[in-house]
Image (cartoon, rainbow, N blue to C red):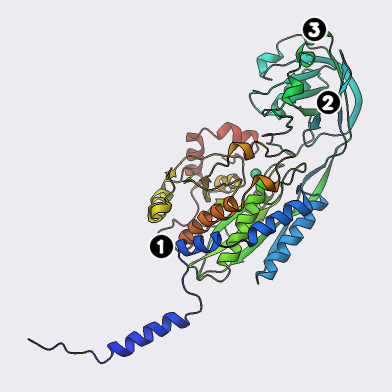
Amino acid sequence: MKPIKKNPLSGLLGVLLTLAVLISPAAALTPAEAEARVKADDATVKFLEHLCDDHGGRLSGSAANVAAMADLEAELRALGLEPTRETFPMPGWVRQEDTLTMLAPVHREMRALGLSYLDPTGPLSGPVVDLGAGAPEDFEQEIPAGAIGLFGPSSRGRAGDVGQRAFEHGMAGLMFINRVDGGQLLARTGGFHGEPLPLPIFSITQEEGFLDTSVDCAASGRWGYQTRSFNQPVQVDNLRVRIPGKSDETVLVGGHFDSWENGQGAIDNGLGVAQLLALARVLRDADLDRTVELVWYNGEEQGLWGSRYAVDEGADAKRPPAVMVNLDMVGVPIGVNAMGHDDLVTLLDWWNESRGEGRLEQGVTNQPWMASDHTPYQVNGVRVITFYAPIRQESVRYYHDFADTFDKLTPELIKDSAGVVASLVVELANAPDLPSGLVPPDQVEQLLKAAKLEERLKGSGLWKF
Ligand SMILES: [Zn+2]
């Protein structure tokens, strides 16, 4: 038997290698480690509770929004990070007391809220007209001048479109019946352009909207309103944190900071605010291949103003990220969406399969959707990724409304969702096969047309092709 010759260096090499691992400045963070650390960290839950309870809703341009963002900035600085602000102008809106009153057949002050961007008008009154679903054919009836229309809740198209139709028919106002029952207002409304409404539009409850006296136009119903809310231009900030990696190529993770003002904006989108903070906490000392940037956008609810500014004129116009991950009302993910970017599917599949037991049950989907902060990026050729991460119905029904409050979330929902997000972000930051460069405009156009988003994008002023 031939004796094995011992390599005199092997012992020394082993020691050196061990030492190198022990003294390396930051051990590489794996997706699984990032997720475990985020799930064990209660700090973001506490911060979101403070943000919601102390400041309430964070309407862009409001004092609450400014104060809440100052708190977030201080929190990030305390972590040793250097957040930067990106200031941009947008059309703001200030809610004041707007009233809607049923005058006949009975007198009743209605539980009602004006849609954003209504202007001061009135007091005015007029006969009521039943507009059904608010579709074009619903307007094919005799409409007295100065009438106030009632429509919904299964309205087709957006309240703004119905408003334009009503304005062209010489109507004086609109009431739309809320889509969710239980005295709720403004649930699931959105999609604004930042232009003053052509006429006042009020959200009213299902319970009052479906009253016989509300819908029975033959009963000489008459309504009155007065609006005091007003429009004004505002300057607001996006907040951004850069966590440098070995390369300048950037993985951007964004979510909107602003909310509607009636509730606390906990689900929409305090959750995303907290998930981004969780990422800042776990990634700040990680040794990543790519740079990670975290952005808290303002102005999302009122028309994606912050993300549009960032990618059209701001930091991301000068240096577009390799990929943008959007966090808007992301519960614990059960799927991840390549958003029509075929060249991301393999990587996302690999990430999901490598999660083993924690594999997202719906896997990877590849279906673009629009109307949150990823949309301006996608239109500009940046690859975007979103999650399929539904929040339970008994909580999510309240978004945009008074009851979108911290109690609708649980610590587990906040931490577990943030953990999955952190896992993906670490994967994207280190993946050797992440596609780079922008998607050519003709391919983006094709992708969005195939997803039948062209008309809606044109309606939102986001279509660039
Ligand atoms: Zn949102």
Q: Quadrant of ligand 1?
A: top right
Residue name at image x 74 percent, y 25 percent? 176
For the residues carrying marks 3 and 1, which lies nearer the camera in this image?
3
Depth check, front residue: 446 or 273: 273
- Label 2–label 1 contact, CB within 8 A: no
Q: Please tell me the numbered disc located at residue 335.
A: none
* Secondary structure found at label 2: loop
Q: Please tell me the numbered disc located at residue 218.
A: 3
Residue name at image x 49 percent, y 44 percent? 339
Q: Up-down: is 70 above or below 265? A: below
Number of numbered discs overlaid on the protein picture = 3
Residue 347 seen in this snapshot: no
Q: Is residue 438 left or right of residue 407?
A: left
Q: Please tell me the numbered disc located at residue 432.
A: 1
Spot the residue most to the bottom: 8
Residue 24 seen in this snapshot: yes
Depth check, front residue: 216 or 393: 393
Q: Is residue 7 left or right of residue 36?
A: left
- Residue 294's x, y, as percent? 61, 59
* Secondary structure found at label 1: loop
| Label 1 CA crowd tier, 10 Å (few <14, some 14–19, many 20+) | few
Residue type, mark 1 in image: Pro
Q: Residue beneath label 2, please?
A: 110
